[in-house]
Amino acid sequence: MRSIKTIVIILFVIIALAFSVMYCYDRLMVDHIPPKIICDGAKLEVGVRASDLDLCKGLLATDDVDGDITDRIIVRRVSRLVGSNSAVVYYAVFDSASNFCTFTRNVYYTDYCQAKYSLSQPMIFNVGSRVTLVDRLTAYDVIDGDISSRIRLSAANISTTVEGDYPLTLQVTNSTGDTSVLALTVQIRNYTSRHPVIHLKEYLTYIEQGSVVSPEDFREWILSARESADGTPVDPEEITITGVVDTSRMGSYDVKFSYINKENLSYSVILTVVVQ
C-alpha cells in the first residue's frame, strides 16, 4: 500500500516538473508578442481599381522576431462608402508564430463617381401601351460595371390611358452602398405614322454643376427629324428647343425638342439633362 502511495507521489512530482518545464519553455522560448503595423500618416488616395498593393502604400509591419514583415500585410476588406468618395480599409498581418495584429485607415478614391444612367430610346409610349425600361435604360458603375439589373422604381404615378407627361423616379445602388437617383418624364401620347418624328443621339446626358448652357446648346443632339414616319427630312434648325437647366443646382431637367408638320400634327421628345 505504501509503495503505491510512493509511486503516485513520484508520478505527481514528475508531472508537476514536466508542466513547469513546458510552462517556462512556452513563456521564455515561444513568441507571444504580436507584430505591429505602422502608418506614415499620409492620406491614402487611389483609383477605384486599386490593387491590394496600392492599398498598402505607406504601411510598415515589424515583428520583434521576424523583423520587417511588410510584405505579409493583407487587406482583409474594404468597407462601404463612408463619405462621398471614401471608405475604410481593414488590414491584418501575421508573424511566423501566428501572432497577428489589425489596422484600419481611410482610403480616398480619386476617380469615384456615382453610377450613371444611359437612355437609348425616348420615354414615349402610346396610350394604352405598357411602360417598359429594360429595352432602353441602363446603368454603369465605375466599381461594379453594368448594374442595369439593379435599377429599381422608387416613385411613379403614370396613367397610360390619358395623354400627358408623368414623373418617374428610379434608383440604383452599387456594391459600396451608394445610391444614384434619376428623375425622368414619361410621355404618354397618341402618336401615329402621320406625326413628325425626331431622333436624338441619346436621350440622357450629364453636365457639370456650374456649367453655362442654353437650350440652343443642345441642338447638336438632334440626330434626324422627319415630317412623318416616312416623310421628308426636317432641317434641325426648324426644331423648337425649350426648357430651363439650372446648373447651379444638381438634379434632372427636361429639354424638349418639338416640331409641327404641315398637317398641323405636333411631336415632342425630351432630352433629360442631369446636373451633377
Image: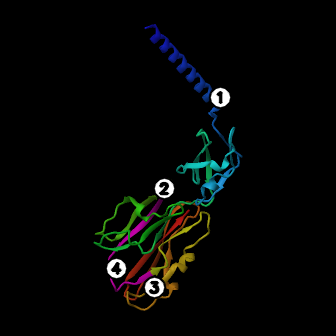
Q: Amino acid at mark 4?
A: Tyr
Q: Residue at x 52, y 15 (%)?
A: 10
Between marks 1 and 3 in the image, the one whose residue lies nearer the viewer: 1
Which contiguous range is marked in magenta?
Answer: 177-198
* Nearest the eye: 66 or 237: 66
Cα separation between marks 4 and 3: 15 Å
Q: Disc 3 designates what residue? A: 225
Residue under the point 68% across and 50% down: 43
User: Pointer 2: what residue?
Assistant: 175
Q: Which residue is mark 4?
A: 191
Distance between the Cα atoms at labels 4 and 1? 88 Å
Rendered position, 22 above or below 170: above
Q: Position of residue 148 (x, y in %)?
A: 43, 65
Residue 41 position in % (x across, y down): 70, 46
Along the viewing direction, whichever of 218 and 95 lies nearer the viewer: 95
Helix, strand or loop for disc 1: helix
SS at mark 4 in the image: loop
- Packing grade of label 4 (10 A; few <14, some 14-19, many >=20) is some
- Type of the residue with mark 1: Leu
Q: Point out the tag, 2 or 4, that comes first from the N-terminus.
A: 2
Residue 7 or residue 65, whichever sits in front: 7
Label whose residue precedes the other's in the sequence (4 or 1): 1
